[in-house]
Amino acid sequence: MKRMSSLAYHFGLKVRFYPSSKQKKIIKLNYDAQRFVYNSYVGRNRNNYRAKGYLAVRQYQVMPFAFSVLNNYETKLAEEVVANNELLAKPKNIRDAYSFLRVKEIDSLAIANAIQNYQKAWNNYRKLGHGIPTFHKKRSDWSYQTNCQYPKQTEAFLDNGTARFIDAKHVKLPKLGVVRIASFRKLIKERLLNHISTRIGTVTIKKTADEQFYLSMQLGSDIAFVKALPKTQSQLGIDLNLDNF
């Protein structure tokens, strides 16, 4: 089965859905878990940065060409750096360290996406030179990301992954189960009915501040989602600001 990035066409889908009271609690739980993991990476890496900087300066000031004996405070700093590095080395380590992250309602892919988003933020900082990852504050709007997986399937469709369409009105999501959606795009309905090969990638579950819930899906396929428009040979004029274009 092809990876999402290797598919020729990509399409973003956003629909409103209506979770039950129990499903709302699961969404909040996954949002809190994802935020906790992201903030843990931010905080522990910041502590490591400060501790390593302090120890490096201390070593240079005391004895630049030999290893000096660490006092109790410096020993604790060094031990903290080692512990943080071990915890952040693998995504599963943070779940092993905190039991509340291992409850069955929490999606392991939500935790993996939090770590991946942190690493992407650092990569963007190294490329652009600004935008260091910061702590995510608690907000009135919630969101978390999961992924659609195809563990045994040889080909991906809209109705055979871990996140899938049941019919024109219902979608099944990891940990949440079946949810009712409000609207359905015609081109998605055609792909579902005609069984056209389409892969679902990242799935984002979001609650707005005014208590509305939205589902966003990243779709990929080798078959175009929109037909190309015919060439009319007509002319079109566009006024551009070239400095900002």
Image: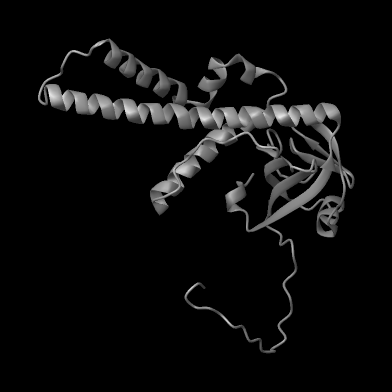
Say left or right for 99 vs 76.
Answer: right
The image quarter in which residue 85 lies? top left
Q: Which residue is pictured at 42% across the width and 47% down the height?
A: 125
Say left or right for 87 vs 161.
Answer: left
Most extreme residue toward the bottom, as rendered? Answer: 234
Look at the image and tell me in which quarter the N terminus lies.
top right
Image coords of residue 74 (percent x, y): 27, 16
Say left or right for 245 vs 129.
Answer: right
Q: Which residue is pictured at 70% across the width and 40% down the height?
A: 141
Q: Report if residue 147 is visible in the image.
A: no
57 or 238, nearer to the observer? 57
On screen, residue 69 above or below 111:
above
On screen, residue 145 above or below 228:
above
Most extreme residue toward the top, as rendered? Answer: 72
Give the color scheme: rainbow, by chain, secondary structure or one colour.
one colour
On screen, residue 83 above or below 133:
above
The image quarter in which residue 194 lies? bottom right
Image coords of residue 131 (percent x, y): 45, 47
117 or 159, nearer to the observer? 117
The image quarter in which residue 17 lies? top right
144 or 4, nearer to the observer? 144
Image coords of residue 208 (percent x, y): 74, 43
Say left or right for 51 vs 8.
Answer: left
Q: Which residue is pictured at 9% across the width and 25% down the height?
A: 65
Image coords of residue 198 (percent x, y): 73, 50
Q: Report if residue 236 is visible in the image.
A: yes
| Numbered disc total | 0
Q: Which residue is pictured at 62% across the width and 48% down the height?
A: 4
